[in-house]
Each structure stands twice: as C-alpha cells, then as structure tokens.
C-alpha cells in the first residue's frame, strides 16, 4: 500500500513537472517568434497566473533548460 502511494506521488510530480516545462517552452517559443529574447521577465509576464505554480528556483531551472534547448536547435 505504501509502495503504491509512493508510485502515485511520483507520477503526480512527473506530470506536474511535464506541464511546467510545456508552459515555459510554449512561452519561450512564442516570445522568440516575436523576435524578442525570452528573458525571465518576459516569460514570467507571458505565464501570468501560471507563474504562481512555480517556486523561483524551479522556474529558473526550467527556464535555463528550455532556453538551452532552443538555442541548441
């Protein structure tokens, strides 16, 4: 029973992480599509209320990862 609960919580965390990455990725792509640099501030503004889902460090990590992917493509 405890193992099932741990697996359930792990899946929930994974799903939340995936959603957050998708939100930031979408914001970065849309901002870059306007020929603007997708800075922290611009992405934060684009996310609006969705930004509240992030802790600052978490947002910074996701932003760094997604901007890195965009610049390497």
Image (cartoon, grey):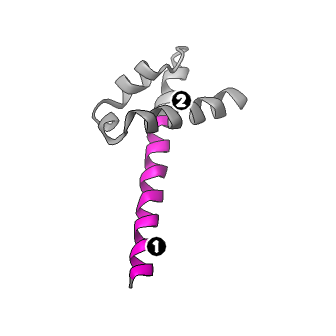
Q: Residue furthest right?
A: 72
16 vs 6, nearest the viewer: 6
Residue 73 in which image quadrant: top right
Instruction: State the SS at label 1.
Output: helix
Instruction: State the SS at label 2.
Output: helix
At x 49%, y 19%, the residue is 39
Q: Residue furthest bottom?
A: 1
For residue 67, side relative to residue 45 (left or right): right
Q: Which mark is residue 63?
A: none
Q: Which residues are magenta?
A: 2-25
How far apart in space, not on screen, are marks 1 and 2 (Cα)?
Answer: 33 Å
Q: Residues within 10 Å of mark 2 (few under 14, many from 20)?
A: some
Q: Which residue is mark 2?
A: 29
Q: Residues within 10 Å of mark 1 (few under 14, many from 20)?
A: few
At x 38%, y 76%, the residue is 5
At x 49%, y 22%, the residue is 31
Is residue 20 inside the magenta stretch?
yes
Task: Find residue 27 and report its horizontal and vertical position in percent.
Answer: 46, 30
Q: Residue furthest front?
A: 2
Q: Looking at the rendering, in which quadrant would you find the N terminus?
A: bottom left
For residue 9, side relative to residue 25 (left or right): left
Is residue 48 inside the magenta stretch?
no
Q: Which residue is mark 1?
A: 7
Of tags 1 and 2, which is closer to the observer?
1
Q: Residue furthest top?
A: 36
């Amino acid at each position: 029973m405890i193992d099932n609960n741990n697996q359930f919580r792990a899946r929930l965390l994974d799903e939340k992480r995936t959603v957050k990455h998708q939100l930031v990725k979408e914001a970065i792509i849309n901002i870059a599509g306007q020929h603007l640099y997708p800075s922290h501030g611009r992405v934060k503004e684009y996310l609006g209320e969705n930004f509240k889902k992030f802790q600052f460090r978490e947002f910074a990590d996701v932003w760094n990862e997604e901007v890195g992917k965009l610049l390497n493509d």
